[in-house]
Amino acid sequence: MMSGDAGSAVLETRDDEAKISDKTKTKFDVIIIGAGPSGYTAGIYCSRAGYDTLILSGLLPGGQLVNTTEVENYPGFENGIMGPDLMIDMRKQSQRMGTTIIDDVVVDVDFRREPFKVLTASEEFEGRAVIIATGANPRKLGIEGEEAFAGKGVSYCATCDGPFFRNQEIVVSGGGDSAVEEATFLTKFATKVHLVHRRDELRASKVMQERAFNNEKIKFVFDTTVTEIKGDQKMKQVVLKNLKTNEESTLDAEALFVAIGHVPNTQLFKDQIDLDAEGYIVLKNKTHTNMKGIFAAGDVHDRSYRQAITAAAFGCMAAIDVDKYLTENADKG
């Protein structure tokens, strides 16, 4: 189960309860950009602490989890829960605490002075503190069948979905640390893991390569790409192309795990807060960015775990840090 943090800050209005009844209300204590597990959790904590809180829910309210089927590893659900249902419940809980949620397009921000400004396609909002929870999107192969079988065999998180494919053959696409790590992890469940990589050698660290090469369940398919995914109700087969010979072949497999990296949704903030070379937000202390009053939670800074439970935890931590910040700066409110 991926964290499901919101794909970006672009949205169209979805429902009446997400609108502000008072159209003149534009000033809030806390503005949260993004509405995956981290954004909704931050909303719950901020509103419960008594702060007037706004969530701008992003391109996909609920983030990646709205495209996920059964979620088995989020605590509190003995029989699992569907990803969209989990996000709907989080949204309703945040609203019940008093959070205002608007589905709108964030087009610009101004973090250079207080109050901080967040501009959408239709309004300008001001906040005393901002939590960035816009998430990160997995890089996709962009091939035929990828979208159609997403959640039906195609996955971007081995930790989340590997247990669904016990005693089956699995394909992993990629050649870096993430791909090799996921392939190795998946051998706990699969009968065989085909690691498909477009180059003639892996890019992963030597230690990880040695571990994978010594695993008899992993079969390496070099100089090859996945060009198509086939199936009916679920994925059943991948089409492979050898980049040296141009020969095509098919491989029967119940799952394809794409492990070619993630793209954090931080383009909107690149000129105002510190980002690393890959675009992830650099935290200075806990959930603090380099700008006082601007915080981050979830996949925008977390490149390691990317789980719904950890994203929610970061949302909690960011809200607590915001509470401390606003308390210490109460005279500015």
Image (cartoon, rainbow, N blue to C red):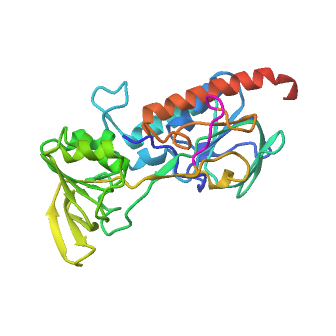
Give residue 114's position: percent from left, percent from top.
Answer: 83, 39
Q: Residue pushed farthest bottom?
A: 246
Q: Report whether residue 268 is seen.
A: yes
205 displayed left or right of 251: right
Percent x, y of residue 65: 42, 44
x, y percent for residue 308: 44, 36
Looking at this view, name the residue that lies furthest to the right.
331
Q: Residue furthest front?
A: 206
Q: Total marks drawn?
A: 0
Taking the image as shown, residue 137 lies to the left or right of residue 179, namely right
Seen in the image, is 243 located left or right of residue 7?
A: left
Residue 181 appears anywhere in the view: no
What is the chief secondary structure element of the magenta stretch?
Answer: loop
Tell me the quarter of the picture where residue 165 sits. top left
Q: Quadrant of the C terminus?
A: top right
Q: Nearer the viewer, residue 121 or 113?
A: 113
229 versus 304 height, above or below: below
| Residue depicted at x 31% and y 69% | 144
Q: Which quadrant of the rendered structure holds the N terminus?
A: top left
Q: Is residue 229 magenta?
A: no
* Residue 50 versus residue 33 in the image, above or below: above
Q: Residue at x 19, y 42 (%)?
A: 187
- Left or right of 103, for residue 243: left
Instruction: Using the image as rendered, state which of residue 315 and residue 285 is in the foreground.
Output: 285
Q: Which residues are magenta?
A: 280-287
Q: Give how far across and how far down residue 176 sits, in percent.
A: 36, 52
Residue at 19 percent of width and 75 percent of height: 248
Residue displayed at 43% across by 57% down: 139
